[in-house]
Image: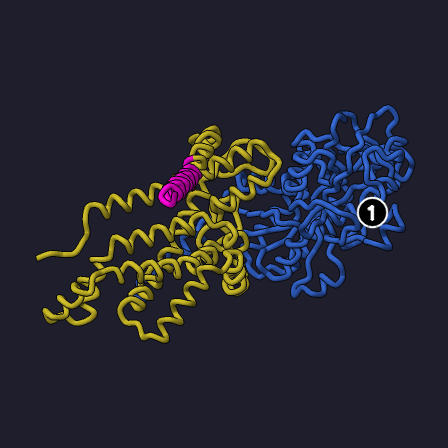
Amino acid sequence: MKTILAISAAALLSAAAAHAQKINAAGATFPAPIYQKWFGEYHGANPGVEINYQAVGSGAGIKQLTDGTVDFGASDMPMTAEQIKAMKVPPLHFPTVMGAVVLTYNVAGITQELKFSPDVIADIYLAKITKWSDPRLAKDNPGVKFPKDDIIVVRRTDGSGTTFVFTDYLSKVSPEWKMKVGANTSVSWPGQTLGGAQNPGVAGLIKQTPGSIGYVELIYAVQNKMPYAQVKNSSGNFVKASLESVTEAAAGAAKNMPADFRVSITDAPGKNAYPISTFTWLLIPSSIPDAGKAKAVKGFLQWMLTAGQKDCSGLTYAPLPSEIVAKEEKQIAQVK
Amino acid sequence: MRLRWRKTVNKVMLAATGVCTLISISALFVILAYLLINGTKSLDWNFFTQLPKATGEAGGGMANAILGTLEIVGLASVMGIPIGFMAGVYLAEFEDKAFGAVVRYTADLLNGVPSIIVGILAWTLVVVGMRHFSAFAGSVALAVMLIPIVTRQTEQFLREVPMSLREGALALGASKWKMIATVVVPAGSKGVVTGMILGVARIAGETAPLLFTALNNQFWGGLNQPTASLPVMIYNRAISPYEDWHRQAWAAGLVLIAMVLIANIAARLVLARGISVPRG
């Protein structure tokens, strides 16, 4: 009886695993729309490979990769030296696309595109500006009639690469923010805030909460037809997040990319550079003992860097500059 | 005077119980009606045959989540029901007083443990142990929840079997295990099976224990792989900002409740065909 049970259990398990090379990944929600499209498309072209991507947030993705419960991770924050040290197998960073964190809002009676200066954004999140009728908002937005409502600040509850990009930006433009709060995947927010889980959760909250403002990846604002703000960049121009403005922000990094690809492009120079831009990374273990899995992961990386890049603009992500693609193709060989 | 007071109290209380009964019944019908109205809009053939689409893309289905729920709940039942049943038989028939009280109390405590905690347990034991998320880990979590429910239900219904039946069996020379297997359990079977079904229905809707055990999957998954399930799918879809996904969450809710109702009704029909005390 026991042997029959054992055999049938083993048969069930192997039958489930036999057909396709199954790979599990988890991490950032910021690039999730394009990742899920990629993994779906790649499976269509290569039915032998199933890559299951769960958008659990960058923090959770790094944690699961460290615990070894997923085959690879994804994050919008490059791993810190300490995080890398905690891993048994050192990870390789593969930039996949570039994207923008946008400020989106739900303000009664306002349909125009609002404009924000860096200090205003910082002070809203530092709880120094608490009303939509604040004169500093009016100064950047002549002709806009703001209501007297309180500003409801929305942020992420989970460990989030989007939060890192946003707070990394605030740390660069506001010394007070840098001192009091700093940049991380989760921070202790100064004022009263409303928390949402992951990019979709934050977008959902803002949609339902009049008077709110929050930060999400561009695609989540676009897909939901939510307005998003122009942000003043380091050259003093108000710039809207777009394929071009994000690409311009990455121009400097494209020329001087560090060997491990860990680079921040917030508050980048450039006349029309969008200041809250970022790369997002796949975190691939440098050694994958299962030969089948290693082959499948490398195959996907090669496809992602070439054919996959064509999907970017449809989902409002910016494709990688060709210099970086060439560098990454070399790095694929380092996955053993 | 007193009589009138009593009559008034009687009327008031009768009305109050009536209203409360109505509220508790209507809750079910409101839920069903709401699910039907919102769920049917997005329910089409694709919902049952297609895999989910990427974030923000319209269309697609939840075939993998429907199969995943059947898989996870099925395996949980295979693991949890026999253990719970045997423990219930022990409590009802063999109980050693002090130990029985401990078992009973533990089962009740386990029944009250928040389901998310059970999820953490399965995560620690199975996910971290096996180094990956899997349907199996989800099943372990659900089985842990199922065991105390089945134990207590089995015990209760077996205790309701009249002592005279037991005495009769023993008087005719049956050994104790034969008495239990051929007289007590068949006599109590209706209640016992109903208890099992209610337990399974209860765990079928659990989300929290699956969030970080079975995780989710946009493909088919498998016992040894992260696997989609309807409750987790509903959770993910419902907190998203996409209209289309909200409709799909309603549809998934409708499918889930239909699966539970069908299981419930089918089991009742089977039982109604009458296993009762064997006569003759």
**Residue A297 among magenta residues:** no
Give the extent of the magenta segment.
Answer: B1-29
Residue placed most toward the observer, B184 or A201: B184
Residue B24 image offset from top left, x and y in percent: 42, 41
Q: Spot the residue most to the left.
A: B280
Q: Spot the residue most to the top.
A: A143
Please report the residue visible at 54 percent of the width from the left and 37 percent of the height from the top: B53
Residue B153 image offset from top left, x and y in percent: 33, 58
Inspect this view and state whether residue A310 appears.
no
Chain under disc 1: A
Residue placed most toward the observer, B160 or A83: B160
In the rendered structure, the answer to whether residue B82 lies left or right of residue B54 reads: left
**Amino acid type assigned to the residue bearing label 1 in the image:** Leu
Dominant SS type (magenta): helix
User: Coloured how?
Assistant: by chain
Please report the residue visible at 76 percent of the width from the left and 61 percent of the height from the top: A81
Residue B173 image offset from top left, x and y in percent: 11, 71
Q: Spot the residue most to the front.
A: B1
Residue placed most toward the observer, B143 or A51: B143
Decide: few, some or many residues near mark 1? Use Cα within 10 Å; few <14, some 14-19, many ≥20. Answer: some
Who's yellow, chain-wise?
Answer: B
Q: Colour of chain A?
A: blue
**Residue B16 among magenta residues:** yes
Quarter of the picture holding the C terminus of chain B? bottom left
Work out whether B252 lies above or below B186.
Answer: above
Residue placed most toward the observer, A42 or B198: B198
Residue A120 image offset from top left, x and y in percent: 86, 40
Which residue has dot 1 on it?
A126
In the rendered structure, the answer to whether residue A177 lies left or right of residue B220 reads: right
Quarter of the picture holding the N terminus of chain B? top left
In the rendered structure, the answer to whether residue B268 lies left or right of residue A251 reads: left
Please report the residue visible at 43 percent of the width from the left and 43 percent of the height from the top: B66
